[in-house]
Amino acid sequence: MSILQAKDIRHDFKGLAVLFGVDLDVAEGERRAIIGPNGAGKTTLFNMITGKYQPKGGAVLLDGQDITRRSVYWRARHGLARSFQITNIFPRLTVFQSLQAAVLSRRSIRLDFVHPVSRMKAVNQEVVELLRRIGLAEQAQVPGGMLAYGQQRALEIGLTLALQPRVILLDEPTAGMSSEETRLVVDLIKRVTAGMTLIIIEHDMDVVFGLADRITVLHYGAVLASGPKEEIQQDPKVKEAYLGEED
Amino acid sequence: MTTRRLNTAVLTIIGLVVLACPSFLSTVHLRLMTEVLYYALFAVSLNLITGFGGLLSFGHAAYFGVGAYITALSLLHIKGLGLIPALLMGGVAAGIIGAFFSIFLIRVSGTYYAMLTLAFNQLLYAVALKWRAVTGGDDGLGGFPKPPLHIPLIGSIDMSNTANFYWFTAVVIGVMLLLAWHLIRTPLGVSIVLLRENEERARFLGHRTAAIRFYLFTIAAFLAGIAGSMFAMFQEFVSTGAIDIFKAVDAILMMVIGGVGHFFGPMLGAMFMVFIGDWLSRLTDMWEFYIGAFFIAMVLYFRGGLISLVLYAWYWLLRAVSGLWGRRTAS
């Protein structure tokens, strides 16, 4: 049963076409990696799915329901949570406050101006639990902007996790990291997203094979191949276009 | 926990000193202190938008002015109108204007937001200036009554008495400041800070940022309207000076000099502007030049504002005291 579908997504930036009819079909509980060279349109596809931009053509379906014209916040409330390739957090809020903002949103306590947040035991308990899961318990009172890079990436993942999403989309969670940091973040992702539907954009093939069971290869705005990772690994077209020219 | 109790104690003492002002201040200074109180609320309400919401408004006098004019007009035209209803009418009218302007202001950020608020302020200024039949134009509105305050079981309190009006102001402004202080501790307050920090990310967390802005602008406008309403009742006169761009700039100066983004900053800024302004203006005709120079110095070298100076001194004092205490118990 597919939970998220993209059908014939087309997009261009001021006439420069970047996606030429991309199809994506992700089943519930599946762990999908999207790979492809720079400029293949991976992040643009994420932006279409999560509503940052409206596609010029095609449709996005969540549970079979057309959400192509839905707003970013509507999608976030209905189970699509994403992280960003370029760290996108709340620099002057502490880690605790950042996660609290996400937990409050998920519990639909967004515009309450009567009850003080400090008295919301269930919310704060949940934040503490999240802090522990992403390994930032000791950094709870540190502003997001002051964290080490790897910790900021962990916070990014924590923010998406706080929404208890049905589909979690991670855009290059290990971008710009050392191999040691990468290993830590991959372990973290494995641990905290176990059993969840995951879509991940990644360049690092070790990360891809460690996290995903199916792979979609994007190449110049179109799907070059899609299938189980072993199959993709052997696919001659993919080898030629992408895997062969490993850097 | 103990620092929290200490902070509460300090704030309580400051509150008591404010209430005790009539016993040790001259009439002239008490009148200045009354001004400090409503300007503090004016600057605090702007700080909700700018310091907490991260949006610089150049048109906050629009709400202050609407509050002032509506209170003046109500007292002038509605016979037997009470003090509190007149006050609330000013605040609510400003809130309604704020909600209406929000329809446009939720769409823009940064420079465009600043320019649009300026434009709305000028629009209302033009109305106040040109609609002479209602607003009196340049001549302003005066001669409206200042009704006594009726309190059940206690009786009527004469508001023409400077000390009585000061206490009334202190209680009204105190309640409004407590509301604002409470606001930033609620989920809406948390959401408002997200606007400043990263509005896009907030949307990806499921926050409908347009709704947050709508609430923020409406509440801030209401508070500014209450401040303007107190201004009208205190001055017993309202003219275009209550709604012009200079009034909007006053709020920015108070907020920045006091400390943007810190809840108590703008209150210090209001105190500074009123008292130092009064003192300087008696010394020299060029007093605004010195205030301006001071503002520039603050922006360039001391972004934290006066409040951060006070906090440095306070923490230094705490450390010194706790050091002494430690030595005494050790020996």
Image: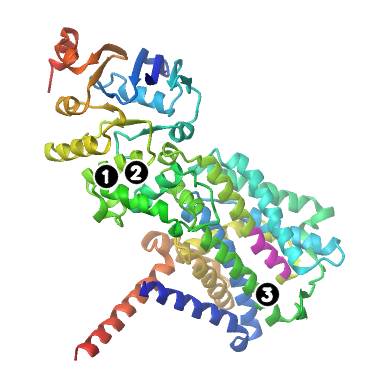
Q: Which residues are magenta?
A: B224-233
The residue that label 3 is drawn on is B168
Q: CA distance from mark 1 to mark 2?
A: 8 Å
Q: Nearer the viewer, residue B289 or B215?
A: B215
Magenta-span inclusion, residue B229: yes
Subunit under mark 3: B
Q: Nearer the viewer, residue A38 or A110?
A: A110
Mark sitting on residue A89: 2
| Kind of residue at badge 1 | Gln
Give the x, y percent position of residue B300: 38, 59
* Residue at 74% over, 49% down: B127
| Kind of residue at badge 2 | Ile
**Residue A75 in view:** yes
Mark 1 vs mark 2: which is more N-terminal? 2
Magenta-span inclusion, residue B301: no
Q: CA distance from mark 2 to mark 3?
A: 44 Å
The residue that label 1 is drawn on is A152
Say left or right for A174 vs A129.
left
